[in-house]
Amino acid sequence: MESRVHVLVIPYPIQGHLNPMLQFSKRLACKGVKVTLLTISYGEYLRDKQAGSVTVQTIADDQEEKNRSMKDHLIKFPDLLSRKLPEIVAEQRNHGYPVSCLVYDALLTRVLEIAKQLGLLGASFFTQSCAVGTIYCSIHEGKLLIPVEGPSVLLPGLPPLLICDLPSFVSDLEHYYPGALEMVTGQFSNVEKADWIFFNTFNSLEIEVLNWLAKKWPIKPVGPTIPSMFLDKRLEDDKDYDLSLLKPNSDACLKWLDSKKPCSVVYISFGSLLALGEDQMAELAWGLQRSDTCFLWVVRESEIKKLPNNFVEETIEMGLVVTWSPQLEVLAHKSVGSFLTHCGWNSILEALSLGVPMVAMPQWSDQPTNAKFVTDVWQVGVKVKADEYGIVTKEEIERCVREVMEAEKGNEIRKNSEKWKKLACMALDEGGDSDKNIEEFVTKLVCNAN
Ligand code: UDX
């Protein structure tokens, strides 16, 4: 039966935002909602397609866009949306699929204004943790003053945070363009006008801070946005979960992992954006070699030249370097025993949901705060310490990898990881907290349409 409810989902078009919002779309679609996910074509790199139950529609700019850099695409995206959204909504109505709600990335606050102008409902979707959201919210409300002073910060619902645990846009004002902090705190500029506010997290993971923020606004956790086939295994239509901007070396990764012993491999990835310095790459490389542990390392094409000479040849017996991996399949593989991660929020949720212990090596944005929770709150990993020059040495890499893979501490971390894996699954399983929140959203949309 054709659904009467049609929702447009609009992520900020970078990998770390496309992935969770596509998964959220799939959860809506399995409850009978028609979902169209809008993104940009990146000069025809992404095409209109059917990603399982979700229709992916790309919006191309009228102006020549083929040679535009990714940064330019991102800067122009809000304007593009302002111009195109009214047309798209009208088109859908003419085709017999009237849109009732825009689910927009919380970074794209302007979409809420467009929704209201078009007489539509608006749902804001936060792709970061509730803890990080609360820090940005406190700044927005003037309750946490910038520059932050004192050795630590006390905010409601959160453990005491050292300055170095805060998101880098807050703790390290000199290194980021001034717009960065405005952009992340601006997520709260019109949030009170949104009809729904979703966070990609789950109740048991962030209960205290969720309860605190829920006193201000009716926020709803709807995560973790992990494909059902890796979590609750309830959705049949779930195979095509990918909206990858890079092509994974899937066969190479999985075949190589198949040849390794259970829990013997450390997987390393720094997500879709981060670029380490050449010195840091070298320390990481030699640290992996010293750890005497098999490794699968994602080094994006643009970063390959930073690898030390002969590293790949010298470690061919113990390691595999690929330019992009099918990360969820890798984390779910029985040979993977730990994940050395930059602590992007998706990577953390993926590792937690699949029960993989972590070595946290945060770099910027929300990653320092995520790392604090990984090590001190959920206790599913250890964090590397940088030296006085800000470099994580090869000795430190070796120590941390060994600690998680072998030492007594590793056992405790593994036990905790198993616990979080179960809780993550429960959140989205039938009747789980996040599942109920999604169900409630769909019920309201249906009532509204009748
Ligand atoms: C960014 C920020 O770094 C992150 O902190 C923020 O919360 C979201 O935006 P990114 O750095 O790319 O994202 O990291 P992350 O959030 O971990 O997202 C990366 C995504 O790419 C994950 O879903 C991961 O599974 C996927 N990935 C990564 C692959 O599919 N293959 C890879 O080889 C590496």
Image (tube, helix red, strand yellow):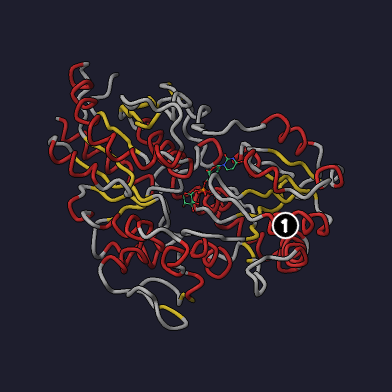
Question: In the rendered view, does 228 fall on the left or right side of 303?
Answer: left
At 76% from the left and 66% from the top, the residue drawn is 399
At 32% from the left and 35% from the top, the residue drawn is 9
The answer to whether one can see residue 433 in this image is no
Quadrant in the picture for the C terminus: top left
Q: Report how many numbered discs are placed on residues in the image.
A: 1
Quadrant in the picture for the N terminus: top left
Q: Quadrant of residue 360 in the image?
A: bottom right
x%, y% of residue 226?
49, 42
The amino acid type of the residue labelled 1 equals: Leu
x%, y% of residue 62?
31, 24
Question: In the rendered view, does 81 fall on the left or right side of 49?
Answer: left
In the image, 436 versus 173, the foreground residue is 173
Asked if 377 appears above or below 224 in the picture, the reply is below
x%, y% of residue 418?
61, 55
At 52% from the left and 33% from the top, the residue drawn is 244
Mark 1 crowdedness (10 Å alpha carbons): few <14, some 14-19, many ≥20:
many
| Residue on which disc 1 sits | 284
Q: Secondary structure at mark 1?
A: helix
In the image, 230 versus 385, the foreground residue is 385
